[in-house]
Image (spheres, rainbow, N blue to C red):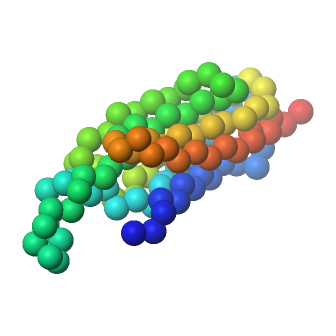
Amino acid sequence: MAKPRPRVKLPKSVSVGVPFTVRTRITHPMHTGLRLGRDGKRIPRRIISRFVVRYNGEETLSVDLERAVSADPYFSFEMAVQESGEMEFEWMEDDGSTYRLSRRVQVKS
């Protein structure tokens, strides 16, 4: 399987206090541990179990996921900020693997 690939889409710049849309997606198969492979053996469970967003180090969103979530989980949410800063995204697999991505949010002056 290919390595999971996180992606994030943000506006190039935002206005102080005005909500903007954040879109995220991670390419991931989300194996539930219930399916059988071609060899008849169970495919081991491998899911993204937690998604966390931080802005300037402060947690702003966290989501706990279960095996019913589809492959390639996609999240879209609204957010407003008061100052420019770093937005950090973290996807955690139930086996302990973690995938991180960060993007700069620029507030218009």
Residue drawn at the location 62% of the way across and 47% of the way down? 101
Residue drawn at the location 19% of the way across and 54% of the way down? 33
Whether residue 56 sits left or right of residue 34 in the image: it is: right
Is residue 28 placed above or below 40 in the rendered structure? above
Image location of residue 41, percent across then percent down: 13, 67
Taking the image as drawn, is residue 70 in sight? no
Instruction: Choose top left, top right, bottom left or bottom right for residue 42.
Output: bottom left
Q: Residue furthest bottom?
A: 38
Image location of residue 51, percent across then percent down: 45, 38
Q: Nearer the viewer, residue 82 or 96?
A: 96
Is residue 40 placed above or below 88 in the rendered structure? below
Residue drawn at the location 47% of the way across and 59% of the way down? 4
The C terminus: image quadrant: top right
Taking the image as drawn, is residue 71 in sight? yes
Residue drawn at the location 70% of the way across and 44% of the way down? 103
Whether residue 101 sits left or right of residue 108 in the image: it is: left
